[in-house]
Image (cartoon, rainbow, N blue to C red):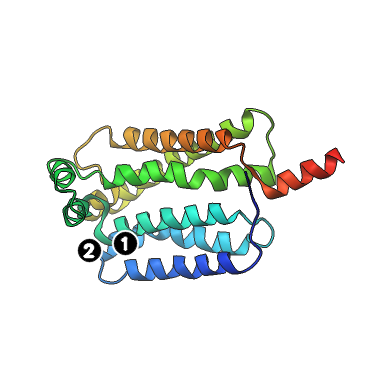
Amino acid sequence: MHLMPHPHRLPRLLCFAAVAVVILSGIRPADWQDWLLENALVAVALPLLVFGYRRMPFSDASYVSLLLFLCLHEIGAHYTYSEVPYPRWLDACGLTSLGEMASSGRNHFDRAVHFAYGVLVTPAVVELFAWRAPPRGIWRWILPVTFVMSHSLIYELVEWMGAESFGGDLGQAYLGTQGDVWDAQKDMALASLGSALAVLVLATCRWRPMFIARDASASSV
């Protein structure tokens, strides 16, 4: 299975959609200061993706995956991660038993997003390595997972420094541990698990970016 970078329409539509999602998330958020903190990295990542498109475009599937992750993140930014009312949404969808289970203890939306980070960002990371530092053999799948693991670690360090810097309710809202002393370790483990699952699926499908497949076909002629 091969996915070719789309040169025109879809990436532009996805870019507009990403901006719209951020704007919608910023309409009367639960905590303005937390919303700004949560979107600090988004303000860096979106321009990098836009300016890097012509020199290093990703596949349509990777861009869609990144947009899906952004949507999940902006939900957390809008409500603050520890207050996302997903149990109520489950009830509204007729999943009452799941809603009751979800509302009985810790709010796990942040854990779900860390897992989704591993799943949804990994395809783009595989392509990033293919563009800039093409690994061979099993390393083609190991390096993206370790890349996601390292970024998960960096994010937890950023959260820690942010919480220490701002302190008080804002620091606690941004950190989002909800009283769990092992929160950072569990978040990193879930991101790593999601990334490992993603590369397992991609490897099973024998997936390669189209520009790599095209180069391989040309060299074999």
Task: Point out the residue furthest to the right here.
Answer: 221
**What residue sits 78% from the left and 41% below the top?**
216
What residue sits right under mark 2 in the picture? Answer: 30
Q: Are marks 1 and 2 in contact (CB under 8 Å)?
A: yes
Q: Which element is circle 2 on?
A: loop
Judge from the rendering whether residue 58 lies leftward or rightward of residue 41; answer left or right: right
Residue 93 screen position, x and y as percent: 21, 55
Mark 1: secondary structure: helix
Picture residue at 43% right of the left edge, 40% below the top: 152
Screen quadrant of the C terminus? top right
Q: Is residue 1 left or right of residue 24?
A: right
Residue sitting at 25 percent across and 43 percent down? Answer: 108
Query: Which label belongs to residue 35?
Result: 1
Q: Label for residue 201?
A: none
The answer to which quarter of the image holds residue 105 is top left
Q: Earlier in the sequence, mark 1 or mark 2?
A: 2
Q: Residue 17's quadrant in the figure?
A: bottom left
Give residue 27's position: percent from left, percent from top: 29, 72
Percent x, y for residue 83? 20, 53
Q: Amino acid at mark 1?
A: Trp
| Amino acid type at mark 2 | Ala
145 is higher (above) or lower (below) than 211: above
Q: Please say if 208 is above or below 29.
A: above
Compare residues 100 and 136 and report the one nearer the observer.
Answer: 100
Q: Position of residue 70 (x, y in %)?
A: 42, 57
Screen quadrant of the N terminus: top right
- Of residue 94 and residue 170, the one placed in the foreground of this image is 94
Of all residues, the one furthest to the top in this rendering is 138
